Image: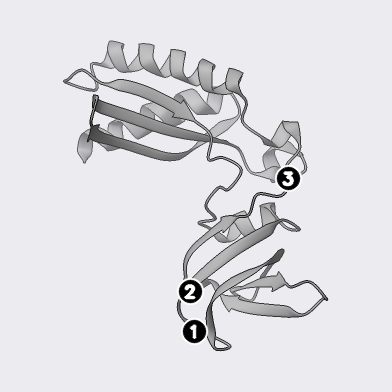
Amino acid sequence: MERLDHVRELAERVARTYGLEIFDVQFRREAPGWVLRVVVDRQGLADTQAKPGSPADSVGVDDCRNVSSDLGALLDVEDAIDRAYTLEVSSPGLDRPLRHAGDYERFRGRLAQVVTAEPVEGQTHFRGRIQGIDAGDVVLAYEGGRQVRVPLALVSRARLDVEF
């Protein structure tokens, strides 16, 4: 765990130089061997002044390549990992998980699926347009305009829906 924390610190340092932040870091044994998976994201909209879903708000192939190259070199210099591994750098994807209150503000207007640990208004699965956060509740709008308030504390998982 201590090693993973160190890797995360190094990854955060590299990501910041490209206006990115670390979304997730995983180091696990898989069929081909050890894989270090680093997921980078664009920094919050307050920092980038970009609209959600715009090219300025998304992580591109060049971003991943730059972080991979710089992070790989830094990990080697720091001798941060004591075994052979494959480094993978990617974005959270179009159906990215929503983890924090800021995500619901950042992706306001986008379609999302939310699952709760306990029923809210008799259900545990919700799908609607994110209206934001209000008084600790995720506010979703259904087609037709009806809204539902889901306490953020009850959300067990949530992700954006891919729209075409």
Identify the residue at image location x=49%, y=30%: 90
- State the CA–CA distance, disc 2 to disc 1: 7 Å
- State the CA–CA distance, disc 3 to disc 2: 25 Å
Q: Earlier in the sequence, mark 3 or mark 2?
A: 3
Pick the residue in front: 60 or 95: 95
The secondary structure type at the circle numbered 2 is strand
* Rendered view: 51 above or below 101: above
Report the disc number at residue 119. Answer: 1
Q: Which percent across, then down, holds residue 154? A: 47, 75
- State the CA–CA distance, disc 1 to disc 3: 30 Å
Q: What is the quadrant of residue 160 in the picture? A: bottom right
**Amino acid at the residue labelled 2:** Thr
Which residue does the numbered mark 2 point to in the structure image?
116
Identify the residue at image location x=65%, y=49%: 162
Q: Sort mark 3 into few (<14), some (14-19) or many (20+) by Cα contacts within 10 Å.
A: some
Pick the residue in front: 8 or 56: 56
Report the disc number at residue 52. Answer: 3
In the image: residue 111, left or right of residue 31: right
Cβ–Cβ below 8 Å for labels 2 and 1? yes
In the image: residue 24, left or right of residue 92: left
Q: Sort mark 1 into few (<14), some (14-19) or many (20+) by Cα contacts within 10 Å.
A: few
Q: Which percent across, then down, holds residue 123? A: 54, 82
